[in-house]
Image: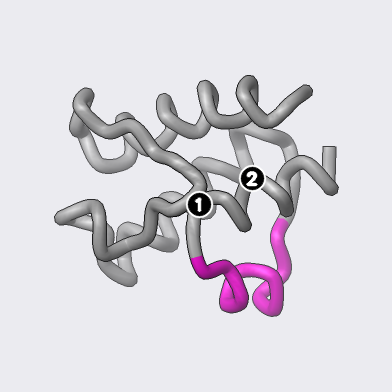
Amino acid sequence: MNRDEIFEQLNEVFRDVFDDESITVSDETTADDIEDWDSLEHINLIAAVEQQFGVRFNMGQIVTLKNVGEMVDLIESMI
């Protein structure tokens, strides 16, 4: 799976979690860019991403993520 395919699937996950069909994430997207992305929704988002891609993040990986691009890199390295 390449980065574009990962982004396509991530866009769907973000739209489902945040119930907003207008969301389109990029490498630079952060929690500051999405209105409802708070700590609780972050947990829901991580769980949904893990389920979508069949991966498991550890706490160290999650807390170091600075933006969606880093999440894509991590997913890419795990699948």
Residue 29 location (% of width, % of height): 39, 52
Kindly indicate the quadrant of the structure image that contains residue 59: bottom right
Q: Quadrant of the N terminus?
A: top right
Left or right: 50 with respect to 40? right
In-front residue for pair 72/39: 72
Q: Is residue 62 magenta?
A: yes
Q: Secondary structure at mark 1?
A: helix
Left or right: 20 with respect to 47? left
For the stretch drawn in magenta, the main secondary structure is helix
Which residue is identified by label 1?
68
Mark 2 is surrounded, within 10 Å at the Cα level, by few (under 14), some (14 to 19) or many (20 or more) other residues, namely many
Residue 27 location (% of width, % of height): 51, 47
Left or right: 7 with respect to 16? right
The magenta region covers: 57-66
Q: Amino acid at mark 1?
A: Val
Q: Amino acid at mark 2?
A: Val
Residue at the image point whose x is 26% and y is 64% from the top: 32
Residue at the image point whose x is 69% and y is 70% from the top: 61
The furthest residue to the left: 35
Residue at the image point whose x is 25% and y is 55% from the top: 33
Q: Quadrant of the C terminus?
A: top right
Using the image, determine if residue 19 lies above or below residue 67. Answer: above
Using the image, determine if residue 43 lies above or below residue 63. Answer: above
Residue contact at pointers 2 and 1, CB within 8 angstroms: yes
Kindly indicate the quadrant of the structure image that contains residue 72: top right
Mark 1 is surrounded, within 10 Å at the Cα level, by few (under 14), some (14 to 19) or many (20 or more) other residues, namely some
Residue 30 location (% of width, % of height): 37, 60
Q: Which mark is residue 4?
A: none
Q: Secondary structure at mark 2?
A: helix
In-front residue for pair 77/49: 77
In-front residue for pair 61/7: 7
Which residue is identified by label 2?
72
